[in-house]
Amino acid sequence: MLDSLSDRLGSALGGLRSRGRLSEDDVSAAVREIRLALLEADVNFDVVKQFTATIKERALGAEVTASLTPGQEVVRIVHEELTRLMGEGSSKLALRGSPAVILVCGLQGSGKTTTCGKLAKLIAAQGKRPALVACDVYRPAAIQQLVTVGGQAGVPVYERGADADPVEIAKWGIQQAKEEGRDVVIVDTAGRLTVDKDLMGELVRIRDAIKPSDTLLVLDSMTGQDAVATAQAFQDAIKFDGLILTKLDGDARGGAALSVRAITGVPIKVITTGEKLDQIEEFHPDRLASRILGMGDVLSLIEKAEQYVDKDKAAELERKMKSAEFGLDDMLEQLHAIRKMGSLSSVLGMLPGVGKQLKNAKIDDRQLDRVEGMILSMTPEERSNPALINGSRRARIAKGSGSTVQQINDLLKQHQQMKKMMKQMANGKKPKLPMLPPGMQG
């Protein structure tokens, strides 16, 4: 996420972290690099100017000069100012009313319709019963796309075809949701290739008819300053309550994430970090600031783990850790849990300090398929007791899984390392990070 910006800021601040004393020239050089990194990321010029001026003023102040670790103090200041730039405080959805109504708007190509499905899945994971309403009657196959996405998310989609009036569809859909006991309704509206009067006029009519608790604008973060200009145009017309930034997993320069709050004054509510329906999360500016500065994001990692890891299985794993019974079936379950949380690189990137180590690592999630194939080629007895796997058994497992004996050896070695690590954790010791699965070492 925002890797290019993260690398540039890391380089700018890296030389300061270990310094015992900072001169004004040291601070000026670092601030200059920060300014260039932000401008290269397509952050608004006025925002960059104000941001770097504040950084320099604070970095040359008493809180840094009197500190025993001035370099670390500067990093802390940059983190605080990044957080302030992207918006402090809570950014949760209001979700008022019965049902609560969310009006989603944006331009074509921003990922609006897919984002509606992701938002429904996110809200459903919070214990609510959402529904979708298809009001985009202009774009070919938009309604069918929403129906498909809704089916994947496991939520109903209310639609009346492409011939009905969008305002009437929205009112009808909300009534349907109320009758069926749905507590959140997400209304997908039409987009355009550019901002125009017809688009804004229709949005205003829908908003006035359904009175949403949240009006959200979907912005493509890869469009940089164009996204900020789009946000300003929508804000002038309909006064939206929050933003959803999409495609933050791509090669985006990231300027929208750092500029749009400062320019519009409207908080970022949600971000999407991939194409899958579960790759969406509530926005926490302090956590994104930590990711950008290479500090990891342990809180988000914990939340993902709580969402995807079965509590009963976790308790059973804890018991096995304490008794050193960690078998290959248990290892396979852990790999499955990690895959549900996202790509391996994104999960490990949330651990402080690990993201930098992975920069040049060749991590291919398909290698997990090979690991699964090797484990499933073993008998249940072999999986529960890997010590039984002698030379002839290794040859058989390799042949059955389309791998080599050396890869089987690597897998068994890694299992032993994980088992040792689990035992260390159970005994309250700090474990060393284990090797990655065979073929994924970097």
Image: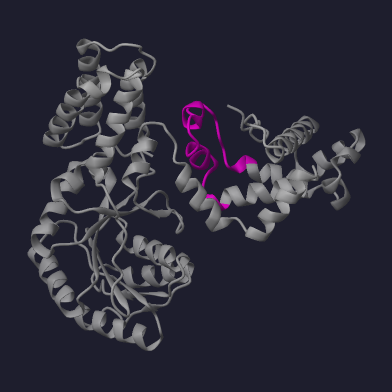
The quadrant where residue 77 appears: top left
Query: What color scheme is it?
Result: one colour
Query: At which x and y percent is residue 327?
Result: 79, 45
Q: How many labels does the image show?
A: 0
The quadrant where residue 374 appears: top right
Residue 263's place in the image compared with 31, above or below, is below
Residue 241's place in the image compared with 379, above or below, is below
Instruction: List the single residue furthest toward the bottom.
Output: 179
User: Residue drawn 11% across and 55% down?
Assistant: 233
Residue 28's place in the image compared with 253, above or below, is above
Query: At which x and y percent is residue 152?
Result: 48, 67
Q: Of residues 422 and 170, which is closer to you in this image? A: 422
**Is 343 inside the magenta-drawn segment?**
yes
Q: Of residues 372 and 144, which is closer to you in this image? A: 372
Query: At which x and y percent is residue 308?
Result: 56, 56
User: Residue drawn 25% across and 33% down?
Assistant: 41
Q: Of residues 372 and 36, which is closer to you in this image? A: 36
Q: What stretch is highlighted in magenta?
A: 340-367
Residue 160 appears anywhere in the view: no
Q: Is residue 114 left or right of residue 436?
A: left
**Is 303 inside the magenta-drawn segment?**
no
Query: At which x and y percent is residue 248?
Result: 35, 45
Q: Is residue 349 left or right of residue 288?
A: right
Give the quarter of the figure containing the C terminus.
top right
User: Residue drawn 64% across and 29% down?
Assistant: 432
User: Residue drawn 28% across and 40% down?
Assistant: 83
Residue 12's place in the image compared with 155, above or below, is above
Give the quarter of the figure containing the N terminus.
top left
Q: Is residue 373 left or right of residue 274?
A: right
Residue 239 appears anywhere in the view: yes
